[in-house]
Image (cartoon, helix red, strand yellow):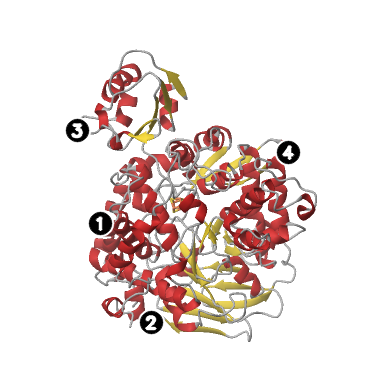
């Protein structure tokens, strides 16, 4: 009998319609855990990292983890793994809700989709029954309409992961939305799904997940729940205010990127912070499967100009459409968020690409002729909202923005205006004001990204301990530890926010109890290190080098202009060599043979 | 001196910010005075289980974390802006 893992992988080839069920490679499962780790191992083994991500040769893997679907707290996450449409790295885009657990209940450790269908299709999975169905009627529909339509003809409780018009039109930062409001947001995984003519995956599962040691598991669950619920952040903070509560503190320390990273301080930020969201927009909090935190925000905008209902904004989204675009109108910000979710595009890259366009426009490099008559200086809330729709549908000037800020800025002759690391847009923490996060952005295996090495916890929030945000000393080790921990955590099916109450000790105990494979804390962290190096190897084979471990010149050379971090720039160069050393990489950022041997990667 | 409150501390103090004129030479003096003014609920958020302040709450003095200054003994001036955040997080 299998514990934690189901032992079965579902493989669907859309080119020839073949559906296969294969045994999970258990040796790899032990080493790479599941979700992000195990799916990345399979992708690395099965595709050439140099392929065109939008070609049928790419594979799209929907991967929950061995803890997904168990009653351990906050285990509703899954990963979508493929070669990224946006920047060609290895993508593992993480989403919550209940889709991941449902895949497990249906009996699968993951679903691998290969090839490409000739016409639009969707996948319908009811336990062992798997069908490729025609989706011609669904093509063109937005995310909520697609979800409703599929539920109507399958099962009203089906968990549906789908693309919107953004994915169909291969917007390079299209996402995959599950249960309407949860996003596998980054890297353009939705464009890869669109390139396969796959509109949706709908799942109903009825099988239990077996646990190896129920007694130890119960103990570990009680311990983890207690630690999360008693922690002031996990227990109350996130539930009451959501992630958007970060706006004021990041602004307070002068590290809220403003107007395409020209500045790190935005005087009217409070207007789109979590306190405002809670007071004026929040209908109720919402949680993913088995979550006791419930950071999700169900919200409503009543202003007729931007009226709507939906979920969000999260901190990243409020920042992107807020200070990064020079906008403080929360109605417009929230509407932009709803539109992104309906169209199925990533809020972070969408917002920051608009910010980049605003910057190019203010500098005179983009003109009214280019935009089709749309004036877009920083702060133009109304036109920002219009642009979101134009991007999602690839209409007019939106078609250019649908390629992301890197290609946009290059097209207009000023690549330095793109605030990206490895061609993916950096998120909501200014790396000039918070040194460690800058090192993480530069070295993240998927490009600009905050969730794979969230050093903001110690650097700004003081969780679980406080370090000086402006210092560089000790940051390489901090970044490595956070990256390894997160790689292992993402591979279990856990939510990152569980770490506001529990850490590697508790996760290793849960994983051991569920799977029956003993993981010490060291084993767990080593698995994270292994996964990090595996992803690095993919990126190197895809053509990236140590030279790509960098931040934009604006971040390295132009100091923050106002606010508490005024005068600061990133000191990446001081940290990178030590980081390489700690990782066991050579001076060019390539893992050494000893390191790969130590991690059983060769 | 201006004191700004965030998240749940806004509900407890029923204000976003206030101007403070009483003499409070250090951050510790100010926190003592604020705990007196706003009572035990406020105190619970800003203090530590075993006494003292700031185990999880964050105090910024003109945007600088008090721990990178002189801690609770940091001297305050009339022109300072003090920001007080209860424990928060996100991502
Ligand atoms: S903390 Fe938030 S994102 Fe994480 S599992 Fe819970 S509700 Fe979902």
Q: Are marks 4 and 3 on the same chain?
A: no
Q: Nearer the viewer, mark 1 or mark 4?
A: 4
**What whole-number distance in Å separates the C-alpha atoms at marks 3 and 2?**
51 Å
Position of the N terminus of chain A by quadrant = bottom left
Where does residue A60 sit, x and y in percent of width and height?
A: 54, 74
Would the CB of label 4 be found within 8 Å of ligand 1? no
Q: Residues within 10 Å of mark 4 (few under 14, many from 20)?
A: few
**What whole-number distance in Å separates the C-alpha atoms at marks 1 and 2?**
29 Å
Q: Is residue B8 left or right of residue A115?
A: left
Chain bearing tag 2 is A
Q: Is residue A171 left or right of residue A430?
A: right
Q: Could you say which disc has been placed on residue A305 in the image?
A: 4
Q: Could you say which disc has been placed on residue B39 in the image?
A: none
Would the CB of label 3 be found within 8 Å of ligand 1? no
Q: Nearer the viewer, mark 2 or mark 4?
A: 4
Residue situated furthest left in the rendering: B50
Q: Is residue A112 above or below residue A491?
A: below
Q: Residues within 10 Å of mark 1 (few under 14, many from 20)?
A: few
Asked if labels 4 and 1 touch by Cβ distance under 8 angstroms, the answer is no
Q: Is residue A277 above or below residue A315?
A: above
Residue situated furthest front in the rendering: A557
Asked if labels 3 and 4 touch by Cβ distance under 8 angstroms, the answer is no
Q: Are marks 1 and 2 on the same chain?
A: yes
Residue of label 3: B50
Where does residue A570 sit, x and y in percent of width and height?
A: 42, 51
Q: Residues within 10 Å of mark 3 (few under 14, many from 20)?
A: few
Chain bearing tag 3 is B
Where does residue A119 sit, x and y in percent of width and height?
A: 72, 77
Residue of label 1: A219
At 41% from the left edge and 72% from the top edge, which residue is drawn? Answer: A536
């Amino acid at each position: 009998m299998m514990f934690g893992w189901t032992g079965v992988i579902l493989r669907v080839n859309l080119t020839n319609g073949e559906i296969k069920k294969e045994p999970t490679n258990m040796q790899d499962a032990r080493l790479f855990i599941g979700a992000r780790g195990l799916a990345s191992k399979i992708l690395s083994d099965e595709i050439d990292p140099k392929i065109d991500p939008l070609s049928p040769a790419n594979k799209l893997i929907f991967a929950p983890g061995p803890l997904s679907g168990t009653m351990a707290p906050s285990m509703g996450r899954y990963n979508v793994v493929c070669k990224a449409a946006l920047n060609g790295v290895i993508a593992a885009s993480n989403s919550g809700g209940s889709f991941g657990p449902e895949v497990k209940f249906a009996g699968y450790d993951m679903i691998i989709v290969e090839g490409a269908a000739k016409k639009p299709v969707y996948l319908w999975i009811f336990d062992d029954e798997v069908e490729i169905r025609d989706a011609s009627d669904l093509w063109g529909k937005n995310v909520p309409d697609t979800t409703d339509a599929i539920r109507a003809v399958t099962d009203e409780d089906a968990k549906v992961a789908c693309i919107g018009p953004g994915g169909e039109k291969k917007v390079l930062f299209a996402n995959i939305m599950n249960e309407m409001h949860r996003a596998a947001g980054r890297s353009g995984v939705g464009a890869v799904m669109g390139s396969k003519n796959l509109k949706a995956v709908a799942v109903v599962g009825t099988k239990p997940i077996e646990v190896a040691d129920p007694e130890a598991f119960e103990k570990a669950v009680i311990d983890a729940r207690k630690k999360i619920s008693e922690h002031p952040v996990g227990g109350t903070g996130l539930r009451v205010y959501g992630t958007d509560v970060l706006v004021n503190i990041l602004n307070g320390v002068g590290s809220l990127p403003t107007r395409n990273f020209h500045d790190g301080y935005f005087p009217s930020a409070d207007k789109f912070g979590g306190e405002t969201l809670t007071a004026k927009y929040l209908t109720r909090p919402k949680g993913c499967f088995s979550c006791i935190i419930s950071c999700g925000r169900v919200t409503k905008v009543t202003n007729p100009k931007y009226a709507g209902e939906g979920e969000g904004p999260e901190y990243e989204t409020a920042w992107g459409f807020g200070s990064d675009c020079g906008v403080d109108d929360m109605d417009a910000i929230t509407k932009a968020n709803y539109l992104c979710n309906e169209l199925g595009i990533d809020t972070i890259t969408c917002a920051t690409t608009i910010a980049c366009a605003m910057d190019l426009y203010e500098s005179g490099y983009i003109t009214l002729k280019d935009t089709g008559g749309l004036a877009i200086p920083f702060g133009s809330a109304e036109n920002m909202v219009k642009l979101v729709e134009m991007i999602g549908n690839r209409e007019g000037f939106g078609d250019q923005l649908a390629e992301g800020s890197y290609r946009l800025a290059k097209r207009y002759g000023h690549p330095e205006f793109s605030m990206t690391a490895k061609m993916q847009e950096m998120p909501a923490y200014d790396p000039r004001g918070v040194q460690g996060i800058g090192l993480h952005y530069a070295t993240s295996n998927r490009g600009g990204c905050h969730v794979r090495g969230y050093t903001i916890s110690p650097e700004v929030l003081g969780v679980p301990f406080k370090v000086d945000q402006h210092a560089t000393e000790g940051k390489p080790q901090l970044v490595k530890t956070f990256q390894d921990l997160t790689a292992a955590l993402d591979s279990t099916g856990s939510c990152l926010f569980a770490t506001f109450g529990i850490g590697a000790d508790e996760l290793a105990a849960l994983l051991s109890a569920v799977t029956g494979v003993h993981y010490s804390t060291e084993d767990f962290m080593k698995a994270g290190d292994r996964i990090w190096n595996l992803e690095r190897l993919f990126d190197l084979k895809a053509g990236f080098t140590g030279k790509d471990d960098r931040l934009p010149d604006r971040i390295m050379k132009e100091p923050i202009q106002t606010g508490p971090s005024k005068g600061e720039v990133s000191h990446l160069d001081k940290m990178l060599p030590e980081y390489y050393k700690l990782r066991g990489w050579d001076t060019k950022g390539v893992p050494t043979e000893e390191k790969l041997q130590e991690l059983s990667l060769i | 001196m201006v004191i700004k409150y965030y998240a749940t501390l806004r509900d407890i103090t029923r204000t976003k910010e206030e101007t403070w004129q009483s003499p409070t030479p250090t951050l510790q003096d100010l926190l003592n005075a604020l705990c007196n003014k706003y009572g035990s609920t406020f105190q619970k958020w800003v203090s530590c289980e075993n006494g003292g302040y700031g185990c999880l709450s964050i105090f910024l003095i003109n945007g600088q974390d008090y721990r990178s200054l002189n801690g609770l003994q940091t001297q305050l001036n009339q022109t300072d802006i003090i920001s007080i955040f209860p424990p928060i997080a996100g991502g």
